[in-house]
Image: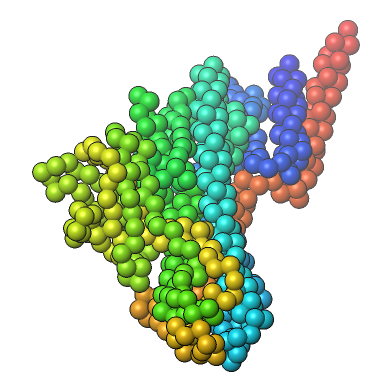
Amino acid sequence: MNLINLAQNGLSSAQAALNVVGNNINNATTAGYSRQSILLGEAGGKSTSYGFFGYGVQVDGVDRAYDGFINNSVRGSSSVYQGINSRYQQLSQIDNMLGDDTNNISVSLGNIFTALEKMSSDPVSQASRQEALSQFKAISYQFQSNSNALNGLEKSTNTQISQTVDDVNSCAKQLAKLNADIEKIHGQTGGIPADLLDQRDQLLGKLSEQVPIKVNENTDTGRVDVTFSNGLPLVNGDKSYQLSASASAEDPSKTVVSYIDASGNSMLLDESKMTSGKLGGLFKFRNEDLVSARDQLNQLALQMANKFNEVNGAGYDLNGEAGGDIFNISNPVAQPNRNNVSDTTLNVTYTDISSVTAQDYTITFKGPGASDWDIKTRDGSTVTPTIGDDGELQFGGISFKPEGTPEAGDSFVVNPVAGAADNISVVITDGNQIAASGSADPDEQSNNENIKDMIAIKSQTIIGGNATLTEAYASLVSSVGSSMTSLKADGVTTEKSHNALLLQQQSVSGVDLNEEYINLQMFSQYYQANAQVLQTATTIFDTILNIR
């Protein structure tokens, strides 16, 4: 009977081994599947006076090919790569917009000065005046079009941030549920279900693409606890913590992300500390690349419009009238914080446009007797204003005065150049209103002294005191192009590193069909050999029974 038991143990083990090999072959192309291996061991035996006799083979378990260190490395490189890639994808849209060689602001500026030079040679010509007017309108449209594209890109980025938050929350919930399922099965059977571990690792991989994470794995139970890189828990056993996307209290057009703790309290994430993952890349693009491009574009639009208005106002039009503004320039708007107690607004006006810089200022009312107003720049530096004749506070080329009665803690954000490209438009309706003459005498229709000053704007350093209009636009294009080149290089390097880690992971966990085919043949022979042992045992048993 012992021989029969040996054969049955062998057949059972061989069948189990073939099941594992078959499962590997079936899932060779299944995403996230980790190769499994049968673990066979001696089934024990007994010692006799004739020696030790074994009881055959037994299945000790099924081993899942897995290396936690490699998986952590893959997740880390995935976060870095996705952060670079998401930023690159967004920035490339600005690069494409600015990279049109035939239709851009630099070309439109050139067309304006070409038209003005024609007008200078014949200030009376209606055709040249209308051409100049049409070029003013063309650059106005160009600024509006570029600004609208940046605004649309900001909305798109906000939408992607919200979608990423939803993906993070979904992954966290599923991981918490898997933790509960895995621990339940482990408690009932003492084993860990390989299919659930594969699902778990896939979710961890997906989560690491969205945000940088740290994973603490209990290899005995299969439970994973997940935290953000800053230590805030995201998954703790069967409990998950959520993120929330909402409009910023300071700027409703900006989507911010908050962390919800166990007590339900909301805490804004520090976007500057989120350096990788898709969410980190989107933050960096919106807070750095987009802000820089928009500020430069608005600054260029504002200073160009102001300079042309200034020069046109110094001359006289075809009718001998003093020149007026060519472009409309809207006053800056102070955005009140949504959490302000009062309904006070700030009336902001320009005092010296030429000294205005692209800068976010946070203006906070501290209350009477506490220096009243506190003004800080984007980097936290304090600005000390001067007081005007009417009690208004002046700084950086602008002034503001509250409309209403502010409460302590009320705050506002203002960028003096914000909206300049959005709102720029041509005021004059007729080419005759272009002030080409330096004389008020309408009989001096051929006077072109003022139009010469307007043409001279082309070579004047009016942007920041060190750049012409075309140089400022070239700087904008260059800064975006430089960031693109740097991101592309970083992306290539990071992708190679990530792919190398994926290959290393695959060498550990992936299924090699050639290897599995060899195992299939080996365990098939193993099965047949044990079948032969069983047949031999049966023959011996029948022979014994047939003895009379």
Is 152 positioned to the left or the right of 375 in the image? right
Specify whether 317 is left or right of 310.
right
Image location of residue 171, percent across then percent down: 54, 35
- Viewer-closest of 237 and 107: 107
When the figure is inspected, residue 521 is found, relative to residue 454, above or below; the finding is: above
Residue placed most toward the observer, 536 or 9: 9
Using the image as rendered, state which of residue 3 and residue 149 is in the foreground: 149
Task: Name the residue at 32% across, 47% down.
Answer: 346
The answer to whether residue 364 is seen in the rendering is yes
Which quarter of the figure has residue 189?
top right
Against 98, residue 418 (above or below) is above
Q: Could you tell whether 173 is left or right of 518 in the image?
A: left
Instruction: Pick the quarter of the image with the N terminus.
Output: top right
Residue 94 lies, in percent from the top left, at 57, 63
State the image coordinates of residue 190 (x, y, percent, origin top left): 53, 22
For the view shown, which residue lies furthest in the left direction? 369
Residue, x 46% and y 46% (percent of image)?
254
In this rendering, the answer to whether 318 lies above or below 390 is below
- Residue 298 x, y percent position in the rendering: 46, 64
Residue at coordinates 33% horizontally, 50% vertically from top-left? 347
Q: Quadrant of the C terminus?
A: top right
Q: Quadrant of residue 119?
A: bottom right
